[in-house]
Image (cartoon, rainbow, N blue to C red):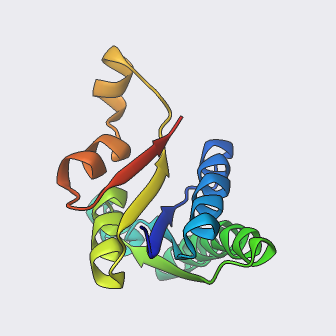
């Protein structure tokens, strides 16, 4: 049924739970997986705040990329252990939901497996929900892991 599953990660424990479920689902269907993590565009953020410092920007970006690689390595290791083909993408985008949707479209994914923090009410409204935005804008099926 599914041939290519996208699994976004933010490195959280909830994300790791979704990774395991997504990889097991891929194994069951004989599908491949792509892991994705979005890092903000620090250049624009720092310039906007008026505190542009190339050294600080480079350090922050390097640390964010290193974190992203560790998050994506977790997906790769989980997939490899299950015998599932895995690719990964680190996108620069201030809106994770946008990076998730664009990666799914660009890679030809037919399912997105992602986690939800399960916030409700005012907390969800104030903090926003990347999961909710993916659910709203994505054109392919989505599995939400709680």
Q: Give the side of residue 80 with respect to residue 122, left or right.
A: right
Give the residue at x 44% y 76%: 3
Q: Nearer the viewer, residue 139 or 100?
A: 139
State which quadrant residue 43 falls in. bottom left
State which quadrant residue 122 falls in. top left
Give the residue at x 27% y 76%: 105
User: Could you say where residue 1 lies in the image, as x and y percent from the top left?
Assistant: 42, 67
User: Could you say where residue 18 lies in the image, as x and y percent from the top left?
Assistant: 59, 50
Q: Nearer the viewer, residue 134 or 63?
A: 134
State which quadrant residue 75 falls in. bottom right
Please, is residue 123 above or below residue 32 in the view?
Answer: above
User: Could you say where residue 29 lies in the image, as x and y percent from the top left?
Assistant: 55, 69
Give the residue at x 45% y 75%: 4
User: Could you say where residue 92 lies in the image, as x and y percent from the top left?
Assistant: 39, 75
Q: Give the side of residue 72 with respect to residue 31, left or right.
A: right
Residue 126 at least partly seen: yes
Please, is residue 5 above or below residue 17 in the view?
Answer: below
Q: Give the side of residue 41 with respect to residue 83, left or right.
A: left
Q: State how many labels appear.
A: 0
Q: Residue furthest top?
A: 121
Residue 53 at least partly seen: no
Q: Nearer the viewer, residue 24 or 92?
A: 24
Question: Which quadrant would the C terminus be assigned to in this image?
Answer: top right
Q: Residue furthest right?
A: 81
């Amino acid at each position: 049924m599914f041939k290519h599953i996208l699994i976004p990660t933010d490195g959280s424990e909830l994300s790791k739970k979704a990774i395991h479920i997504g990889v097991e689902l891929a194994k069951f269907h004989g599908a491949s997986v792509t892991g994705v993590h979005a890092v903000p565009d620090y250049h624009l953020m720092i310039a906007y705040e008026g505190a542009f410092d190339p050294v600080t920007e480079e350090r922050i970006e390097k640390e964010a990329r290193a974190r992203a690689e560790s998050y994506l390595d977790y997906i790769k290791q989980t997939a490899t252990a299950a015998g599932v083909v895995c690719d990964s993408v680190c996108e620069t985008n201030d809106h994770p939901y946008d990076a998730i949707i664009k990666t799914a479209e660009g890679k030809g994914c037919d399912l997105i497996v992602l986690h939800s923090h399960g916030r409700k009410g005012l907390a969800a409204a104030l903090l926003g929900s990347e999961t909710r935005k993916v659910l709203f804008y994505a054109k392919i099926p989505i599995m939400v892991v709680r």
